[in-house]
Amino acid sequence: MTMRLHVRHATHFEYDTAVDYAVQRFLLSPLNFASQRVVNWKITAPGMEKSLVYSDGFGNKVHVASLANHSGPMNVIAEGVVECDDAQGMVKGLSEITPQAVYLRQSAFTAPSEAMLRLVVPLSGAGDTLTFLHDLMQQIHQNVEYQTGTTDAKTTAGQAFAAGSGVCQDHTHIFIGITRAMKFPSRYVTGYLVTGTGASSTAAHAWAEVSVPDLGWVGFDVANCLCPTDQYVRIAAGIDAASITPIRGSRRGGVVETMTVEVKVEIAQQ
């Protein structure tokens, strides 16, 4: 069955003074692969009409836009329709640019603590690789409660695991930290998930993908304890959350910045 999803990701910026000059990088565009097809997609933002478009080292589609002498608020809106199939988490048909060995490298956010690695001990003899990964996902899900407001963008996997709570970013960092320690290439993925009719959130979603022998890349959403289905839209992948933030940039002027985000994902009419 094919699911057609409509996504609207709106980011609103307010500045205390005019922005003299700014350059922004957007990682907000989904890719086509075996179980995902982009029907239409558009990013609306100041300077987009002259933006540079390229694929980065991880194969993500990147837009870079600049603006000058901008006063008042600024909106960045990524919106479109994507068709998705349920491939039981398997990701096929993406161009592989980065050697898999790169995805074994730990970052400051994924580096596992001793407590995290002890979680593996009772699972180490658990059947095949896929069974082990599903069991690990379940164990992390049970040990780290989904709870907003207990972590932030600077929280590491070890800190979130010790606290026993966090959000999808933390669940994903913990899972990646452990799987990389077990010598499984693993990457951090951003995207969107249908959460209910008319529902909206203040952030995109995150999950992990692991290279499984004889299967290829397989997704694991620890926060929801399942593999991504036809209700997920995949956007970008990298080493950790910091490496693939949806919007990143630098500016001159506009010293104080306030940012609000609203993400809405709904099932579109077929």
Image (cartoon, rainbow, N blue to C red):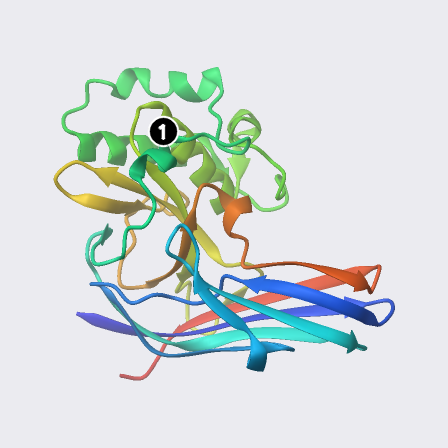
Q: Residue 246: x, y in percent?
A: 54, 59
Label 1: few (<14), some or many (≥20) within 10 Å?
Answer: many
Q: Residue 44: x, y in percent?
A: 56, 79
Q: Residue furthest right?
A: 17
Horizontal relation, residue 96 to residue 111: left or right: left
Which residue does the numbered mark 1 point to in the structure image?
Answer: 180
Q: Residue at x 44, y 64 (%)?
A: 54
Instruction: Tell which of 20 and 45 is nearer to you.
Output: 20
Pick the quarter of the image with the C terminus: bottom left
Q: Residue at x 16, y 36 (%)?
A: 213
Q: Residue 253: x, y in percent?
A: 83, 64
Q: Residue at x 65, y 75 (%)?
A: 75
Instruction: Tell which of 192 and 64 is nearer to you.
Output: 64
Amino acid at circle 1: Arg
In terms of image quadrants, where is residue 260?
bottom right
Horizontal relation, residue 185 to residue 46: left or right: left
In terms of image quadrants, where is residue 3?
bottom left
Pick the quarter of the image with the N terminus: bottom left
Q: Residue 38: x, y in percent?
A: 32, 74
In terms of image quadrants, where is residue 32?
bottom left
Instruction: Tell which of 244 and 178 is nearer to you.
Output: 244
